[in-house]
Amino acid sequence: MKTLFSNLIALRKFDWVVLVLTLVLVAIGLSALYSIDLSRGDTLTFFPTQLTALALGVMVFFIATAFHSSFYQASAKLSYVVCWLLLLAVLFFGETIRGTRGWFQIFGLSFQPAELAKVGLILFSAWWIEFQGRRFDRWQFVLTSGFFTLMLVLLVLFQPDLGSAMILIGIWFGLLFLTGVKKRYIALLLILFAIIGSIGWAFVLQDYQKDRFFIFVDSSRDPLGAGYNVRQSVIAIGGGQFLGRGLGFGSQSQLHFLPEAQTDFVFSVIAEELGFAGAFTVLALYFLLLWRLLIIAKNAESDFGSYVILGVILMFFLQILVNIGGAAGFLPITGVTLPFLSYGGSSLLINFLLLGIVECLVRCRQST
């Protein structure tokens, strides 16, 4: 306990750049959610809930920084097992929201195990990579890491949550690529993905999920149906021009032309109400955050620490790409949240947990 307390107060060893960039992003997200709430009447819904999640997230952040990096390395296997069991349990005991059985209700708050699975996969993958002792030239490494990832992905797909499944696969494939496995293995995996994708298209994907792909290819295909969301999002982004319409004055979000504005299309709300300047600021903050994390990863004291941070970078990058790409009409809408901006307590808590682990690795490196 004494060691835990002394670690907790070692604030001078924090990478404050990461924390400040994150809090600025959260502040922008809260502003957008407050604006969305204004359009729904006198009672605020999203803003206070997200504010509660922020308070819990900051608490989780500081608790996560208090442990030694060896704790996360030692608990990597256990975290994977716990995540797998939670994903299994939510299929039987979870709440169904918008057609996905993927939430637990805890003290009035919703918790999504698929978000925690990202943490479990990152920690376990980093441990497994270090355990291999840099022997990445073997096909067995690809198979085993793929098997452990697939065990999580399948349970997520059963919910079904295609967006989270895609992020999990992206984290695994990205880490695999960064380890420097043989190019022919990567080529074989891409062929395998194409085969699995074809089978999934024919037998797994629901009609609404296929519609999202068709709308991605041609947004004018069904402008009043499946293509409605994307068209309204693009209109909102373009309507903001340079300085925006002002917070609370976005026509698409305030008049409810933009469905799920608090989650899938929060970037569209920011672009409409804060304009190009606001959208560019968000993208710049993300770039600086990812760049700072990349520098930390390069200076990590171990392979485990380096690959944990690279896994965090991959997760953030993929979610930013998929969410903003979907809002701008460049990618299909998958329901993936925009880190630190979208409404969602589980997502915000997990993001702060991951940054807390990163800060822990920074502190422990400076202590050696």
Image (cartoon, rainbow, N blue to C red):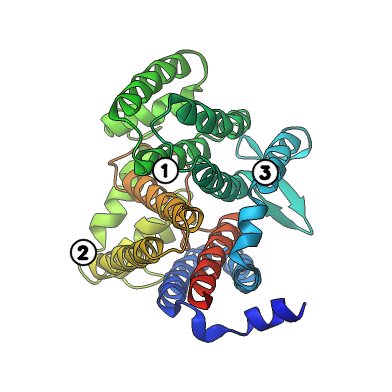
Q: Secondary structure at mark 1?
A: helix
Q: Residue at x 29, y 29 (%)?
A: 183
Identified by mark 3, the residue type is Cys
Q: Residues within 10 Å of mark 1 (few under 14, many from 20)?
A: many
Give residue 240's position: percent from left, percent from top. Answer: 26, 63
Q: Residue at x 23, y 56 (%)?
A: 238
Give residue 185's position: percent from left, percent from top. Answer: 35, 25
Give residue 247's position: percent from left, percent from top. Answer: 38, 72
Residue indicated by mark 2: 241
Cα–Cα gap, marks 1 and 3: 19 Å
Residue indicated by mark 1: 175
Residue in the foreground of this view, choosing between 357 and 257: 357
Identified by mark 1, the residue type is Leu
Q: Residues within 10 Å of mark 2 (few under 14, many from 20)?
A: some
Residue in the foreground of this view, choosing between 189 and 200: 189
Give residue 201's position: percent from left, percent from top. Answer: 44, 18
Which numbered disc, 1 or 2, marks the residue that appears first in the sequence? Answer: 1
